Image: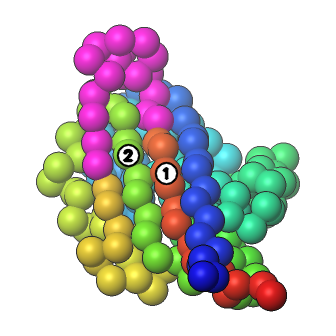
Amino acid sequence: MILPDVRVGHGYDTHRLVESKGMVEIVLCGVKIPHHASLLGHSDADVGLHALTDALLATVGADDIESHFPPSDPQWKDASSDRFLAHAARLVSQEGGTITHCDVTLLCETPKISPYRDPMKTAIASLLGLEGKRVSVKASTNGGLGFVGRGEGIVALATATVVFPREE
């Protein structure tokens, strides 16, 4: 019996929240969300898409997001993270892979993710050309513990499953 070449990649990212004067918009999993604090980062600081980008890069052994889009490079200043995810998806495709499932977990006290979960799933599915049921977005608080619990940052964890043709 020949088994398929199934690879699972894992990604992690975190960005600091910094107080803003008034309401601003942060981007999580490709969706703009009103919030009282900004996410600090060189790009748009979308922790969800950054973690998912790393997960996809892992399936092809392509290092991490910073090796492809260094924060020291001014061309990535304020860049939309969908560009990073598209790049990772292209690398997977060039290696013959088919993305079959993505899962993102956001850890934050605020904003509340549930009102934005479906638009996030839709955004990721659209960016990767997947059916909506092949994308999962979940959220949890950190129970008031640590920097996440104090509202100082947001963490994202992501897993991507990719199937590759069997090499014989």
Q: Which mark is residue 158?
A: 1
On screen, residue 57 above or below 98: above
Residue 109 point in image, percent of width and height: 28, 28
Do tag 1 and tag 2 residues touch (Cβ < 8 Å)? yes
Report whether 113 appears left or right of 4. left
Badge 2 is on which residue? Answer: 105
Residue at image point 69% right, 58% down: 58
Residue at image point 40% right, 57% down: 103
Q: Residues within 10 Å of mark 2 (few under 14, many from 20)?
A: some
Residue 116 point in image, percent of width and height: 22, 57
Disc 2, SS: strand
In primary-sequence order, the first of circles 1 and 2 is: 2
Q: Is residue 152 magenta?
A: yes
Report whether 36 appears left or right of 68. left
Q: Which mark is residue 48?
A: none
Residue 135 point in image, percent of width and height: 35, 68
Which stretch is magenta? Answer: 138-155
Q: Quadrant of residue 32?
A: bottom left
Residue 84 visible in the displayed image:
no
**Marks 1/2: CA distance?**
6 Å
- The amino acid beneath tag 1 is Ala
Dividing the image into 4 quarters, which one contains the N terminus?
A: bottom right
Residue 107 visible in the displayed image:
yes
Q: Residues within 10 Å of mark 1 (few under 14, many from 20)?
A: many
Residue at image point 45% right, 16% down: 147
Report whether 6 appears left or right of 132. right
